Every structure is written in structure tokens, then in C-alpha cells.
């Protein structure tokens, strides 16, 4: 499978649950990103990993915890979320953090916090 | 800081109409410019890009020209189809991921 794959596509969780989002890319890219897309708001960069090392945490609350075990896989661990965290979470990758050729995005996980 | 301004939508067109979605930007240096498209229920897909002034990016019948003098990168298509219905995002990169800025998106609806 090529491109960036995200699972699950949809997730409903209670505020006390713990869940994880998964992202996988088979493009040989070295940089991976988590973005949050909320209605009527610009895309928000959350985390950046370059060669498995976190290079950016864009003031994201600690209830979001990223993990990057290797350059092909990225996780976002979720716990004690709030209803305002409901959004589309997009994973993206690029050849490097310069991203001169743009990003390749996954299809996203639609998260609903109840 | 950097910014990208897109025309507000939704833009509603009849099939085979001409499309223009305006995008202007503010950035330091000489950014690369991008258009992404997001179909319903999907993530963003890179549609086209331009890396320097007067470059024209093109893909799937869509075109955009990098106009440094007007700091614009307007998206055009000569004849839209129903399948082009999506949200279109203009973006710039002025020096790596920390300087990537997306517009807020313009929704296009094409009716038969």
C-alpha cells in the first residue's frame, strides 16, 4: 500500500477513555506531522518528527501524547480529552522538514469526544 | 509573520463553467506556493505547486501562476466537473515546516 494510511477513520470516545490514532507511510519520508483540522479554523500543526525525533510540540495539551517508533509509523495517544478536541486529525509526511515538495496527507481520523 | 488569504466560499458553479479561486499571501523571502484539494471525507491532496516567480503549476486541468508583483497564486480551471466539488486550500512554505501556512479553504460546489 502506498501513501499515508491512518486508522481508525472514525473514533468516538468518552472523556475518560484512552485511545490511540495510528499513521503509517510507505513513501520513504523522514518527517511526519500531526495536524488538527476543526471547522472554520485554519489547520493547526500539533507535532513534528524528523528521523523519529520530535522537533516540534506546538503548545499542545498533555492529554495528547505522540509517539514515533520509526520513520514509517506515528501514533497519537489520547486520554481524558475534552469535547472541544473533537476534530479531524490529519497525519502528513514529507521528504524532510524543509517540505519543499509539499506534504502527503492521510485521510484523517474523525474524532468525536462525548 | 506569514499569512494566506483565500476568498470565502462556498463557490457554486454549473458544470463546464470557468473557475477562479483567489489566493494572496504575505511572506518573508521567496516562498514556495501550493494548492491542496480535500474531497469529502478525505485528507488533503497536493494539487499543484510553484517554487519561484512566474512559475505556473498545473495538474488535472487546474493551473496557478506565481505572481510576485501581486503576491497572488490564483487557482483556475477552464471547465469544472461535478467531481471537482471539494475544498481547496492555498498554502505557502517560506523555509521549512515552521514556516508552512495554510489558508482557511474555499469550498467549491459544482452542480450538473
Image (cartoon, grey):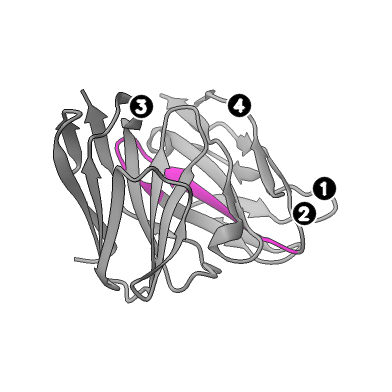
Label 1 to label 4: alpha-carbon separation: 19 Å
Label 2 to label 1: alpha-carbon separation: 6 Å
Q: Nearer the viewer, residue A47 or B109?
A: A47
Q: Nearer the viewer, mark 3 or mark 4?
A: 3
Q: Nearer the viewer, residue B103 or A14?
A: A14
Q: Residue furthest right?
A: B69
Q: Position of residue B64 (x, y in %)?
A: 64, 52
Q: Which mark is residue B8?
A: 4
Image: magenta residue range: B30-44
Say which label, 1 or 4, has the lower sequence index: 4
Q: Residue at left 53%, top 39%?
A: B79
Q: Are marks 2 and 4 on the same chain?
A: yes
Label 3 to label 4: alpha-carbon separation: 24 Å
Would you name the residue on which mark 3 appears? A84
Q: Are marks 2 and 1 on the same chain?
A: yes
Disc 1 to disc 4: CB gap under 8 Å: no
Disc 2 to disc 3: CB gap under 8 Å: no
Neighbour tally class for label 2: few under 14, some 14-19, many 20 plus, Cα within 10 Å:
some
Q: Position of residue A17 (x, y in %)?
A: 14, 35
Q: Are marks 3 and 4 on the same chain?
A: no
Amino acid at each position: 500500500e502506498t501513501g499515508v494510511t491512518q486508522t481508525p477513520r472514525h473514533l468516538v470516545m468518552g472523556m475518560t477513555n484512552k485511545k490511540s490514532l495510528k499513521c503509517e507511510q510507505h513513501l520513504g519520508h523522514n518527517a511526519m506531522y500531526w495536524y488538527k483540522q476543526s471547522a472554520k479554523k485554519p489547520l493547526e500543526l500539533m507535532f513534528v518528527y524528523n528521523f523519529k525525533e520530535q522537533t516540534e510540540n506546538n503548545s499542545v495539551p498533555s492529554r495528547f501524547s505522540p509517539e514515533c517508533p520509526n520513520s514509517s509509523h506515528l501514533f497519537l495517544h489520547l486520554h481524558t480529552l475534552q469535547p472541544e478536541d473533537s476534530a479531524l486529525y490529519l497525519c502528513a509526511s514529507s521528504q524532510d522538514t524543509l517540505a519543499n515538495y509539499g506534504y502527503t496527507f492521510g485521510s484523517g481520523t474523525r474524532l468525536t469526544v462525548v | 509573520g506569514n499569512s494566506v488569504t483565500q476568498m470565502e466560499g462556498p463557490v457554486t458553479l454549473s458544470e463546464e463553467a470557468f473557475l477562479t479561486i483567489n489566493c494572496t499571501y504575505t511572506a518573508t523571502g521567496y516562498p514556495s506556493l501550493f494548492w491542496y484539494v480535500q474531497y469529502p471525507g478525505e485528507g488533503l491532496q497536493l494539487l499543484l505547486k510553484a517554487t519561484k516567480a512566474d512559475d505556473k503549476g498545473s495538474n488535472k486541468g487546474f493551473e496557478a501562476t506565481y505572481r510576485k508583483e501581486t503576491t497572488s497564486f490564483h487557482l483556475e480551471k477552464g471547465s469544472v466537473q461535478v467531481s471537482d466539488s471539494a475544498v481547496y486550500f492555498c498554502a505557502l512554505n517560506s523555509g521549512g515546516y515552521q514556516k508552512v501556512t495554510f489558508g482557511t479553504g474555499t469550498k467549491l460546489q459544482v452542480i450538473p
